[in-house]
């Protein structure tokens, strides 16, 4: 089974959960929880995409 898109992108970009969480202004445990969600809410997806430097559409399955 493939990892959720958020995790796959984070690993592709060689980022740690902590690095992404800091970019988003949230805690690492909070980001870890978001990473397991198969389809985060639109607002959350946009924040994660901004932290990754990609578009929100790229996080969709």
Image: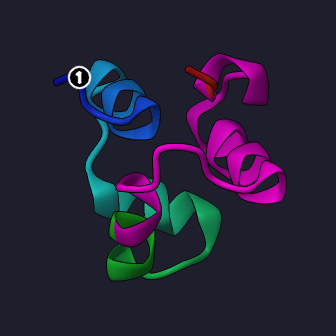
Q: Is residue 43 above or below residue 45?
A: below
- The x, y position of residue 22, in whole percent, is 49, 67
Quarter in which the N terminus is drawn: top left
- Which segment did they paint magenta? 33-59
Q: In this view, does 54 lie to the left or right of 21?
A: right
The single residue placed furthest to the right in the displayed view is 43
What scheme was used to colour the molecule? Answer: rainbow
Mark 1 burial class by Cα count in 10 Å: few <14, some 14-19, many 20+: few
Closest to the observer: 18 or 46?
46
Return the residue found at the far front. 1
**Predominant SS along the magenta part:** helix
Q: Position of residue 12 (x, y in %)?
A: 31, 19
Please say if 46 is above or below 17.
above
Counting labels gives 1
Residue 41 lies, in percent from the top left, at 73, 56
Name the residue rendered at 26%, 29% in the picture.
11
The magenta stretch spans residue 56: yes
Q: Which residue is drawn at 32% across and 80% down?
A: 29
Q: Is the residue 41 above or below the residue 13 in the image?
A: below
Left or right placement of residue 51 versus residue 22 in this view: right
Residue drawn at x 32%, y 64% as measured from the top left = 18
- Residue 14 location, quadrant: top left
Name the element at disc 1.
loop
Vertical side of 29 occupied by 11: above or below: above
Magenta segment includes 27: no
What x and y, as percent, mark residue 2?
A: 23, 22
Q: Mark 1 sits on what residue?
A: 2
Quarter of the picture containing the C terminus is top right
Q: Which residue is drawn at 70% across and 46% down?
A: 45
The answer to which image quadrant residue 3 occupies is top left
């Amino acid at each position: 089974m493939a990892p959720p898109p958020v995790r796959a992108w984070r690993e592709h970009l060689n980022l740690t959960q902590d690095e992404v969480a800091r970019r988003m202004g949230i805690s690492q445990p909070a980001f870890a929880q978001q990473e397991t969600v198969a389809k985060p809410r639109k607002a959350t997806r946009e924040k994660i995409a901004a932290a990754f430097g990609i578009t929100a559409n790229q996080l969709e399955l």
